[in-house]
Image (cartoon, rainbow, N blue to C red):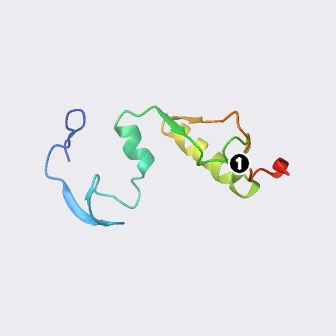
Amino acid sequence: MAKGGHGTLAGAPVSDSAKHGKGIRLRGDADHYTLLDQLADSGVRTLCFHSHWSWMGYPMPPPEREQDLRDLVDACHAKGIQLLLYASPLTADEAPEWD
């Protein structure tokens, strides 16, 4: 597929099965072309995560998700993308210190 202008696709996009019906295959090797690849190829240089990485207002991810966050940071950096994590000044009632 050729590169289009901002916000457009050029060439003949291929329709393919997707999670919720039909989707556009953005690259031939769909098994190895990730969302981070797509974002980097589109010129994205910073991703901002709101509350996906931790409980709202908690400065650390839950222990069971800490390695996932580290892996995501490494994957973003490998693609030249920064990951900006939102931190709220509030405290979540899911936080261990809440009690």
Q: Quadrant of residue 9?
A: top left
Between 8 and 78, the one lying in front of the other is 8
* Left or right of residue 26: residue 69: right
Residue 31 in the image: above or below residue 58: below
Residue 9 in the image: above or below residue 20: above
Q: Which residue is mark 1?
A: 61
Coordinates of residue 75 in the picture (x, y in percent): 55, 45
Coordinates of residue 86 in the picture (x, y in percent): 60, 36
Coordinates of residue 61 in the picture (x, y in percent): 71, 48
Q: Which residue is pictured at 66% across the width and 46% down the height?
A: 70
Between 35 and 22, the one lying in front of the other is 22
Q: Which residue is pictured at 33% across the width and 66% down the height?
A: 20
Q: Amino acid at mark 1?
A: Pro
* Left or right of residue 30: residue 2: left
Q: Badge 1: how crowded within 10 Å, few (<14), some, or many (20+)?
A: some
* Left or right of residue 92: residue 40: left
Q: Secondary structure at mark 1?
A: loop
Q: Which residue is pictured at 24% across the width and 33% down the height?
A: 6
Q: Which residue is pictured at 82% across the width and 52% down the height?
A: 96
Coordinates of residue 43 in the picture (x, y in percent): 37, 33
Between 91 and 65, the one lying in front of the other is 91
